[in-house]
Each structure stands twice: as structure tokens, then as C-alpha cells.
Image (cartoon, rainbow, N blue to C red):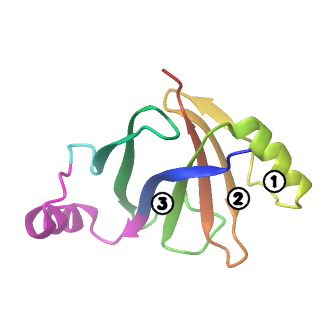
């Protein structure tokens, strides 16, 4: 079974999100969009056989989205098929944070690594 097949996003807290976005846009050329993040598109022929993307997005410093982790970042990994991966990880003793959800951008589930880093597992919509 395939597990992680790519990095879906890098999310981190920022004390001044707008200032930080402006700095990254000006100095590193990050194509920050109106919603406050950037999307880097790429093609993954080997696993997805379609266009894919990685999201870069600062969050407000007081976000609760990274909870229960106390870290200032969260990693998002693209997975091929979330439901069987959840079953497998649970059989390996991995505890999940809350319930998996399905929304307009795909299916999501969350875990913590041994150091308390929140990991978001994401199965993009199949087209």
C-alpha cells in the first residue's frame, strides 16, 4: 500500500501574517494570492498521473488549527487512499486527532508524530 506520495502543504504561524507574506513575495518571489498563501503546481506522473500542487500558507499566530500540537507549524502530506491508511495506522498504534473529514478539497485526517508535530494527511479529490 502506498502511504505518503507527496508534500501537500507547509503551514506555519506568523505574528504578522500580512507583513510576512509581503516579505516572502518581495524577496523570494513567492506568488502570494489574495487568500494569504501560495500554490506551487507540479505534475506527478508516477503516482497521481495529473497536475498536483503544494500549498505554502502562514496562519495567524493565534490559530487553533494546529492544536493539540504546541508547535508553530504543521505539515500536510498527500496520500493515495486515506481510508485504508487510517485503518493501517490505527493497527500500528497511531492515534488520530478527531475524526477524518471529507470536504470540497478532499479527505483529511490528523495525527501527531512522536515529538508532538501535527501531521495532516490529505487525499485530494480524484478527477
**x, y percent for residue 87:** 84, 44
- Choose mark 1 or mark 3, whichever is in front: 1
State the separation of the CA atoms marked 2 and 1.
10 Å
Question: To which residue does mark 2 refer?
Answer: 111
Looking at the picture, tell me which residue is in the foreground, 43 or 87: 43
Packing grade of label 3 (10 A; few <14, some 14-19, many >=20) is: few
Q: Which residues are magenta?
A: 12-32
Q: Earlier in the sequence, mark 1 or mark 3?
A: 3
SS category of the residue bearing label 1? helix
- Residue with the most extreme front position: 46
**Quick check: 51 above or below 38?**
above
**Label 2, residues with CA under 10 Å away: few <14, some 14-19, many ≥20:** many
Labelled disc at residue 63: 3
| Residue at 52 percent of width and 28 percent of height | 125
Within the image, what quadrant is residue 23 found in?
A: bottom left
Where's residue 46, x and y in %? 49, 41
Q: CA distance from mark 2 to mark 3?
A: 18 Å
The mark found on residue 89 in the picture is 1
The quarter of the displayed image where residue 14 is located = bottom left
Neighbor class of circle 1 (other Cα within 10 Å; few <14, some 14-19, many 20+) is: some
Name above or below for residue 63 compared with residue 82: below
Name the residue: 38% across, 49% down: 54
Q: Position of residue 104 (x, y in %)?
A: 50, 26
Amino acid at each position: 500500500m502506498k502511504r505518503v506520495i507527496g508534500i501537500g502543504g507547509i503551514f506555519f504561524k506568523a505574528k504578522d501574517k500580512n507583513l510576512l507574506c509581503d516579505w516572502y513575495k518581495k524577496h523570494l518571489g513567492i506568488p502570494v494570492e489574495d487568500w494569504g498563501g501560495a500554490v506551487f503546481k507540479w505534475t506527478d506522473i508516477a503516482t497521481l498521473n495529473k497536475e498536483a500542487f503544494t500549498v505554502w500558507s502562514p496562519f495567524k499566530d493565534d490559530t487553533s488549527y494546529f492544536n493539540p500540537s504546541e508547535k508553530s507549524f504543521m505539515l500536510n502530506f498527500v496520500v493515495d487512499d486515506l481510508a485504508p491508511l487510517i485503518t493501517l495506522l490505527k493497527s500500528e498504534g497511531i492515534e488520530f486527532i478527531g475524526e477524518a473529514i471529507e470536504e470540497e478539497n478532499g479527505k483529511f485526517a490528523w495525527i501527531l508524530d512522536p515529538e508532538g508535530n501535527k501531521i495532516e494527511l490529505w487525499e485530494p479529490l480524484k478527477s
